[in-house]
Image (cartoon, rainbow, N blue to C red):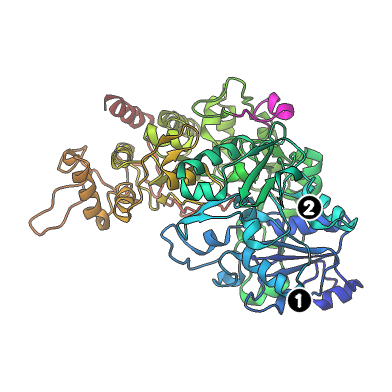
Amino acid sequence: MENKFLPICKQDMIDRGWDELDFVLVTGDAYVDHHSFGTAIISRVLEDAGYKVGIIAQPNWKTTDDFMKLGRPRLGFLVNSGNMDSMVNHYSVSKKQREKDLYSPGGKMGCRPDRAVIVYCNRIREAYKDIPIAIGGIEASLRRFAHYDYWSDKMRKSILIDSGADLLIYGMSEKQIIEVADALNNGFDPKYIRHINGTCYMADSLDEIYEDYVLLPSYKEICEDKAKHAKSFKLQHDEQDPYRGKAIVEPYGNKFLVQNKPEKPLNREELDAVYALPYQKTYHPIYKEMGGIPAIEEVKFSVVSSRGCFGSCSFCAITFHQGRAVQSRSHESIVDEAKYITTLPDFKGYIHDVGGPTANFRQEACKKQITKGACKNKQCLHPEPCKNLTVDHTDFIDLLRKVRSIPNVKKVFVRSGIRYDYVMADKDNKFLRELVKHHVSGQLKVAPEHIAEEVLDYMQKPAGNTYDRFRQKFFAINEQLGMNQYLIPYLMSSHPGSTLNSAIELAEYLRDTHYQPEQVQDFYPTPGTLSTVMFYTGLDPLTMKPVYVPKSKTEKAMQRALLQYRAPRNYDLVQNALVEAGREDLIGFGARCLIKPRDERGYGNRPSNSRSNGQKNANGRNTKSNNNSSKGNNKQQDSRNSKGSFKQDSKASRSSNTKRKKR
């Protein structure tokens, strides 16, 4: 049978009648030919442009042998770490090694090195010396400037310098990769490929830069002065727009890193064309005996509807990588893919997701953004929705109706998460009603992250009462429809700006709403985010004002424990936190207390109003949830399997809000 995957060995090249490849793409992931994997997209885009591409997936990095198995490519090597930064892939927020790698055969750990892009480039240089190398993907994109590295707890240089590559391609890269390929094919020396948007290169002097640019503080300066690093990030943040942005220059002694302004996003026709390429929609057959690639299970029966996000949460890297401009596929493109999914032998009638970074974003934030770009010093949804924001769910409603009307489709879920403040900005309940009635799999995932106003402000998330109003509306619609569905709120502890008092406020909110999360995500400082700069510098780059940052293991443990204050294992931490914060009023037997005093045996008891997941609430409704895990994405955080669920009637919700207002 014909092998429709791209070549991974010499025999595959022979079978295609190829003596030589134009490009060899080296990746830290196993080879999965599905458009949810960056390696598949870039290799197929190049193939569609007429280039011969081979894949070296998860090579043995301890020798050069694997890097040479496809021979010397005619034009060069392309390198990425895979769908995740290799350090995030390997380590939890506590810097402990993870047990599984979902992008490796059978979930096996150890199939890629730490800092994979750098290691792979070093081995390629050993094997082929001066061959052109371009780096890309999430690891290169988010580390394109000097950045704080959480795992080594220090500033690192741009990955372009540390890797020794010739060119860095950032963002989603479909347009840039073809321009780079064409330039190399036309005989350009890689050091002279300096004209392509969405790329970074090294210059020997400022005189070599022939366009307007913003000059950042030097690497030496930001290593010596955290305030200069914060200012540097603000400058980077301001210029990440393909329409109004300028080139950015970062000095390194007598060398200069130059970031050309971002490439313009793909239009709908271009995006459709990318998703229509001949992907095999699964992992390479060589992995079958090894247990397959677990990551495919998250996307196998899902459809990518859009990319980009104008939500701009401070802790999320999507805007730095994909941009603020939302791009979406046509209904025809999505319906065609959904029809294909129904032909898969193990399809059971359920489309698991139709979404993207934010499922209910299907168009640009406003008309201005289409031609003039995103506003420089203003967000679309924070601190409240912009008056120019286009709030319209009509297109998404129509799309979901079309997908669920496909023969053999029983149900279409929206699991990638919705932006609830955007829903609340809608003038009617048509979308939310449609969502609740047809597209919730018993549980709807939303991300309030916190409830304390000061923390939400640093997160650039909507105020807590917005989530309260959404929650009430969600349950009211469920009641009207005679349905009994749940909300799964993602919560984050220890984000910059969060004090013990902030965590206690959130614990009290959980008490009042009778919700106990089974898992809580500690803030994870990853490259390319505003929150990470706050974590490292103790300053908000947007205002240059000091930010409180919880860093000690003890305080982080206490903040996390407060969000799960009912768990007996957390009693000591919760008690210590309440005493330290001067909130002993929450230790006692009253209805508002979080924990009881210790008894004569020295053990704490659960408060009388606590309930384990699965017990009934005051209205006799069972609060036990289905244990569905969260869908993976490119947000560069630990996946959070929030298994706890919550169901409460509107009367209880109103009571909760009244208590919060009184406080």
User: Within 10 Å of the Cα at label 2, are there few (<14), some (14-19), or many (20+) other Cα atoms?
Assistant: many
Is 366 one of the magenta-colored residues?
A: yes
Residue shown at the point (44%, 51%) measured from the top left = 642
Q: Is residue 355 visible?
A: no
Q: Position of residue 569 (x, y in %)?
A: 26, 58
Viewer-closest of 393 and 194:
194
236 in relation to 63, above or below:
above
- Disc 2 element: helix
Q: Position of residue 237 (x, y in %)?
A: 59, 38
Circle on res. 399: none
Mark 2 highlights which residue? 177
Q: Position of residue 251 (x, y in %)?
A: 62, 48
Viewer-closest of 570 and 410:
570
Quadrant hosting residue 588: top left
Residue shown at the point (52%, 47%) measured from the top left = 221
Residue at the outermost top position: 387
Magenta segment, which residues? 364-376
Residue at the outermost left position: 600
Query: What is the three-letter code of the residue carrying label 2?
Result: Ile
Quadrant hosting residue 159: bottom right
Point out the image quarter for the N terminus: bottom right
N-terminal of the two: label 2 or label 1? 1
Q: Position of residue 24 (x, y in %)?
A: 78, 66
Circle on res. 68: 1
CA distance for labels 2 and 1: 22 Å
Query: What is the three-letter code of the residue carrying label 1?
Result: Met
Viewer-closest of 1 and 475:
1
